[in-house]
Amino acid sequence: MNENGDEDAILFELSSTIVLLAGFNPCLLAVLAFLASITISSNGGKKEMLIIIGGFCAGIFTTYMIAGISFLKAVTILPASRDFITLFMTLLIGVLGIWHIYDAYHLRYHSKSTFKTPGSIVSFMNKIHEKNAFALSFFAGGLFSLVKAPCVGAVYLSILDMLIARTDLLEGVVYLFVYNFGVVLPVLVLGVFLAFGLSPETVMQFRDKRRSAIRFVTGIVLLLLALLLHLNLI
C-alpha cells in the first residue's frame, strides 16, 4: 500500500472510533430516553417508538450531511479559504474541548450541565407522539443538532476538519455518509433496545452516573485532536 493509502486507512480507523464516541454523547442519550419515556407515557407501542427514533436519527443524519457538504463545497469553490477554514475549525475544536472539560467539572460539583436545552425544544418534543410522528421527530432531530451543536457536534467537527484538508468533494461526501451513519448507529441500536423493553430510566441512570466522565474524556479527545490537526499529524 502506498503512502496515501496508509494515510487514508489511518484516517478511516481514527475517525470511525471518534464517531462512535459521538454517538454515545450524553446529550443524545438524554433526548433518546426522553423520547422513549413520552412515547410510553402516551401508550405508544413499539412501532411508534421505532418511527420516532428513526425520524429523529434521520433528522440528525440529514443535518450533518447538509452541513458537511456545504463546508466541503465552500472549500472546493474557494480553495484559497481552505487554510483559514481549517485554522478556524481547529481553534473551535480546541475551545469546545475546553468547554467539555469545564462542563465535566460543573456536572461533578453542581449536578447540572452548561449545555442547556431550551424549554421550547422540550415542549416541541412533547408533541412528537401526536400525528405525523416521523415528520415531527425528523424536524426535532435536525433542530436538536443545531441547538445542541456545541454538545453533539464538537466531535463531528474534527472529522470534517480532516476531510477538508485531505479529500476532494466527491470523496468527502462518501466519507461523510459513512461517518454520519456511524454517529447515529449507536442511537439507533439503543432506540431498538428501548422499543423492545429497555427502561428509559435505566438509560437516564447510566447517563447521570457517567456523563461527567464522558464529558471529560470527550474534552481531552477534542484537545488532542486540535493539537494533532494543528501540527498536521492527522
Image (tube, helix red, strand yellow):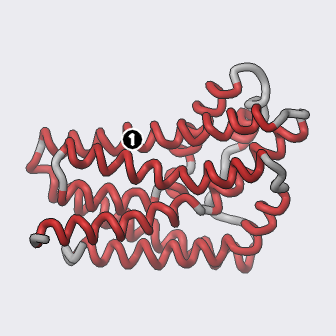
Residue located at (72% from left, 66% from top): 207
Rendered view: 3 above or below 151 = below
Residue type at mark 1: give it: Met
Dot 1: what SS?
helix
Indicate left or right for 208 with 53 as reference. Answer: right
The image quarter containing residue 119 is top right
Residue 160 position in % (x across, y down): 32, 55
- Identify the image quadrant of the N terminus: bottom left
Residue located at (36% from left, 70% from top): 14
Q: Give the number of callouts.
A: 1
Residue 170 position in % (x across, y down): 20, 42
User: Is residue 147 at least partly visible in the picture?
Assistant: yes
Q: Which residue is mark 1?
A: 65
Residue 231 position in % (x across, y down): 21, 77
The image quarter containing residue 151 is bottom right
- Identify the image quadrant of the C terminus: bottom left
| Label 1: how many Cα within 10 Å (few below 14, some 14–19, many 20+) | some
Residue 178 position in % (x across, y down): 38, 50
Residue located at (47% from left, 74% from top): 98
Q: Residue furthest top?
A: 131
Q: Residue furthest front?
A: 1
Indicate left or right for 3 with 21 as reference. Answer: left
Indicate left or right for 83 with 234 as reference. Answer: left
Residue located at (37% from left, 37% from top): 66
